[in-house]
Amino acid sequence: MLTNRSKVVVKKEMNFWERIYLPAILGGIVITIKHLFRRSATVRYPEKKREISAIWRGQHVLKRDDIGAERCTACGLCAVACPAEAITMIAAERKKGEENLYREEKYASTYEINMLRCIFCGLCEEACPKEAIFLTDRIIETDYGRKGFVFGKDKLVEPVDQRVDVSKRQTPAVLEFKQHKQLTHNK
Amino acid sequence: MISFLLYKGILSGAILALTLLVAAYSTYAERKIAAFLQDRIGPDRAGPFGILQPLADGLKFIMKEEIIPNVSNKLLFVLGPCIAMLTALMAGVIIPWGGTLIMDGVEYSLQIADLNIGILYVFGVVSIGVYGIMIGGWASNNKFSLLGAIRASAQMISYEIAMGLSIIALIIMTGTLSLREITLLQTGGVGGDWNMWNVVYQPLGFIIFLICAFAECNRTPFDLPECETELVGGYHTEYSSMKLGFYLFAEYINMFVSSAVISTLYFGGYNFPFMNNLGLDHNTITILGTVAFFLKITFFIFFFMWIRWTVPRFRYDQLMNLGWKMLIPLAVVNIFLTGLVLIFMNR
């Protein structure tokens, strides 16, 4: 009633043509035969992939900085922002001589995202003050068990020699937002 | 004598192989047509366009674990699918697959046996088919199987009456029970002596027969015996491996045979338009006729599948109402109309 779209159902007696079903069935088979000549809505997946949006949110990446040190400082803002509570991490202190591995004094010794919980909303990326986590256009691979979907640092941190390009997600709106240097997390 | 046996042996072997091939590819066609009607692609992994899918399915059925429930009657449990398969194959014997081929002055008919009670034989064999389902369902010792089997037998018995009555009108018209003679009576047609197919004279009988054929084959909208939403799998709930394969296969063979019977009775069998006006020699006409016959069969198999993906399943009381209160009276009316018309035509 709230939407004003409710209809009163009238259950009236069927007339002769409705009772013998045949006209209705004829109408039905005309509808189905039309679908025979329609282009199929599905694609042959592994060979042919659907075009995805420029800002598609897929598997996460933990970025390294220019010298190859991990940007993440295990502040936990992403875990707090995560509505699905998919992110967990354990922080550790950087030792002497590890400056080329971790950018700041604190880093995440373990960092796990449960991809079965993740809803790919991208709030972790928005929350990150260090531009360490990004969502990419990669699709999570399938697995037979649940354990395989808990991605640790081995799968999340980008390899030094194979950097993951996240510039595609940097739409004009995002870049515009990042120019506001007075916002603390853009510093 | 030996050449006669050889010819019959080759013919029945060829028809057996053909029936199995058509049944195997019906499973593939069913999935493909289902896919196309639902805007999907369907099986396309095994071979080009998934053309080897029936082989893969068959292999899977054979490799699967064979389970015979402890509480079942083991003899009958195995016998059920055998009967279903056997009776399904038996009906192909009397169908005239084509005219005659003349080789070295000897005339070879493309029909294994021309029984003068052809239609009755079909009915008899089809009626035995219900034993396969009934025995299988009962021997499983499972309530769902039993319910499915009871439904199947009730449904088949009910629809056989209407089917038989719809045929009587045709028999009154043609005056013969032999399928070959019924086919020969429909020779000519368009372009010839305007001797039309029986469907022109018996439209009502054809519709009744078609609906009953759907029910006899346990096809949607009458697939209550294996109604998976209510009965798990119906009569074949407890079956696995190739025994299940036999039941499913028997259904497709039944579909093939009923398509052949419908084509023979109402759509001129191996006759095709202009067949006697093209000036072709006898053997060419026979081969073209067989091709035409298979095209008709293919269309009806397609029609079976087309209906399956269009019409939802009937409720059980609707099924019985349709059978007993609609189709049987209509078939009787059809008999009277045919009789009256024939009496007035003869005057």
Image (cartoon, coloured by chain):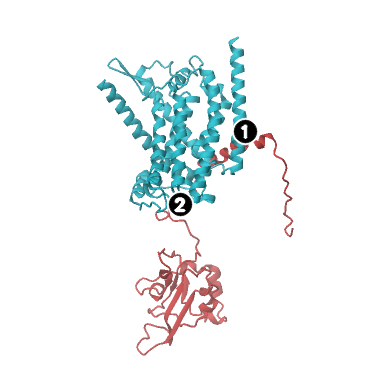
Chain colours: A red, B cyan
Q: Residue furthest top?
A: B347
Look at the image and tell me in which quarter the N terminus of chain A lies: bottom right
Q: Quadrant of residue B343?
A: top right
Residue A28, position as x, y percentages in the image: 58, 40
Side of B136 relative to A171 (left or right): left
Dot 2 falls on a residue whose secondary structure is: loop
Residue A139, position as x, y percentages in the image: 44, 64
Position of B98 relative to A31 (above/below)? above
Position of B222 relative to A117 (above/below)? above
Dot 1 falls on a residue whose secondary structure is: helix
State whether residue B294 appears in this view: yes
Near-viewer residue (B181 or B29): B181
Residue B53, position as x, y percentages in the image: 37, 46
Residue at horizontal 47%, vertical 36%? Answer: B302
How far, Cα to Cα, is label 1 from label 2?
45 Å
Q: Residue furthest left?
A: B2
Q: What amino acid does circle 1 point to?
A: Met
Tag 1 near tag 2, CB within 8 Å: no
Position of B188 relative to A18 (above/below)? above
Near-viewer residue (A51 or A13): A13
Q: Badge 1 is on which residue?
A: B326
Position of B87 relative to A186 (above/below)? above
Near-viewer residue (A179 or A163): A163
Q: Badge 2 is on which residue?
A: A43
Mark carried by residue B110: none
Q: In the rendered structure, the residue with mark 1 lies on which chain?
A: B
Mark 2 nearby-residue class (10 Å; few <14, some 14–19, many ≥20):
few
Q: What amino acid does circle 2 point to?
A: Val
Residue B152, position as x, y percentages in the image: 51, 41
